Amino acid sequence: MAALDLLGRRWMLRILWELRDGPVGFRDLRTRCDQASPTVLNTRLTELKETGIVTQNETRAYLLTSLGRELYESLEPLQRWANHWAAEIE
């Protein structure tokens, strides 16, 4: 349940999604997250760093760790299901 509690927090899944292709700086990440509050975004990134899901590189951009990549990949079946479900209801 701890994982669901963490991932259920606002912006968590969106942050994982936006970091899927590599490092992203804070400003770009905020733009990609529809102008999420800087305070909330910073809090979420701190929580993800504390759990070992996200880290920062030498330029201070955020990226998924190997654990974060594994988590993202585990969500791919859910994305496939969601795409199928969306097609069914159209």
Image (cartoon, grey):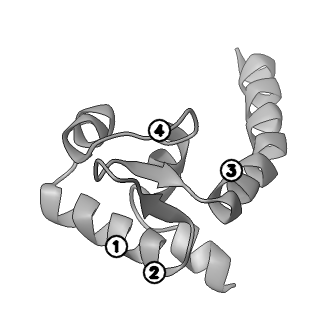
Amino acid, disc 3: Tyr
Q: Quadrant of the N terminus?
A: bottom right
Q: In this view, does 43 lie to the left or right of 9?
A: left
Density class for disc 1 (Cα within 10 Å; few <14, some 14-19, many ≥20) is: some
Task: Name the residue rendered at 75%, 26% in the picture.
Answer: 83
Using the image, determine if residue 14 lies above or below residue 51.
Answer: above
Q: Distance between the residues labelled 3 and 2?
A: 17 Å
Q: Is residue 86 left or right of residue 39?
A: right
Which label number is shown at residue 72? 3
Cβ–Cβ under 8 Å for marks 4 and 3:
no
Q: Which of marks 3 and 2 is in front?
A: 2
Q: Which residue was labeled with disc 4? A: 18
Q: Which residue was labeled with disc 2? A: 50
The furthest residue to the left = 38
Q: Closer to the camera, 8 or 14? A: 14
Dot 2: what SS? helix
Q: Position of residue 87 (x, y in %)?
A: 76, 17
